[in-house]
Image (cartoon, rainbow, N blue to C red):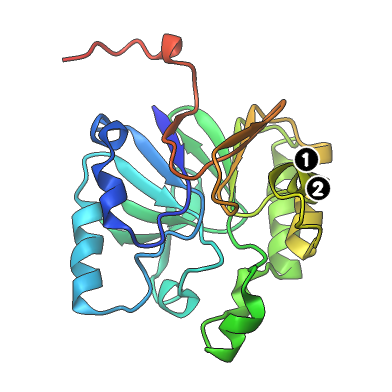
Amino acid sequence: MIFVTGDLHGDVERFKNPEIKKLRKGDTLIICGDFGFIWTGDKKEQKILKWIGKHKFNVLFVEGCHDNYDLLNGYETSEWNGGNVRRISGNLMQLCRGELFEIEGKKVFAFGGGDSDDHDERIENELWWKEEQPTTQQIQSAADKLTQEDYKVDYIVTHDAPAKLKGFINIEDNDCSYINSFFDLIAQNCEFSMWYFGKYHVDKIVPPRYRAVFRDIVRTEPKSKDKRKSK
């Protein structure tokens, strides 16, 4: 089964969530950006990354607005389930931006990055990366991959959200960046079952096919379709 959750920001306690502990070998946990465990590169962090990678289920994430892109870019890319990933450690992988994956029989489109709310402050502290926003080439490549699938996927996983949704999540946030506008185009042209995003630190369904995730561990399919027997 595929499960989705929101920003971790390097909080190892989140892996102690009872719902995460129920995941089994072959399951998949996708984190919608701001993974946060790739930040300092020190020995303590490396130890945590190895511990996460040893989980029996796959731990996947898209990059957010608070991830260290310099360190992420240091990991080599490789092919996994039809798309490019950065394998961080064991079963821990970053889903590269604009890639399409076949995960447990489902087509998953992943596109990390976003518009940082504390952009100016982080520039002053030299903790902002231009890679948080997509390049024209990344957008074109993503569009090409969706075209090859006739713009039909099962799930879309991002950090930020389409511009049209921002008012539903945060009434005071009316700023729209390059990535929000691009996501609007995808929303208009793509057929999908559900779109998950994590940037806004809320757990909220936006009908009919969007879900903001933060602390919830969301099953992508109804429980009635999970035919596994409990031990």
Q: Nearer the viewer, residue 104 or 164?
A: 164
Q: Nearer the viewer, residue 116 or 193?
A: 116
Residue 227 % position (x, y): 35, 10
Q: Amino acid at mark 2?
A: Asp
Residue occupying the point 70% across, 58% down? 141
The residue beneath circle 1 is 187
| Residue 129 disc label | none
Residue occupying the point 15% across, 15% down? 231
Quarter of the image holding residue 23? top left
Residue occupying the point 72% across, 68% down? 137
Residue 50 seen from this side: yes
Residue 60 % position (x, y): 40, 49
Q: Amino acid at mark 1?
A: Ala
| Residue 184 disc label | 2
Q: Nearer the viewer, residue 81 or 93?
A: 93
Q: How many other residues sit within 10 Å of disc 2, few (<14), some (14-19) or many (≥20)?
A: some
Left or right, 69 with reference to 172:
left
Q: CA distance from mark 2 to mark 1?
A: 5 Å
Quarter of the image holding residue 173? bottom right
Q: Nearer the viewer, residue 171 or 187?
A: 171
Do the numbered discs 2 and 1 sit on residues whose CB atoms are within 8 Å? yes
Q: How many other residues sit within 10 Å of disc 1, few (<14), some (14-19) or many (≥20)?
A: many
Which corner quadrant holds the N terminus?
A: top left
Left or right, 4 with reference to 54:
right
Residue 15 % position (x, y): 27, 46
Q: Secondary structure at mark 1?
A: helix
Q: Secondary structure at mark 2?
A: helix
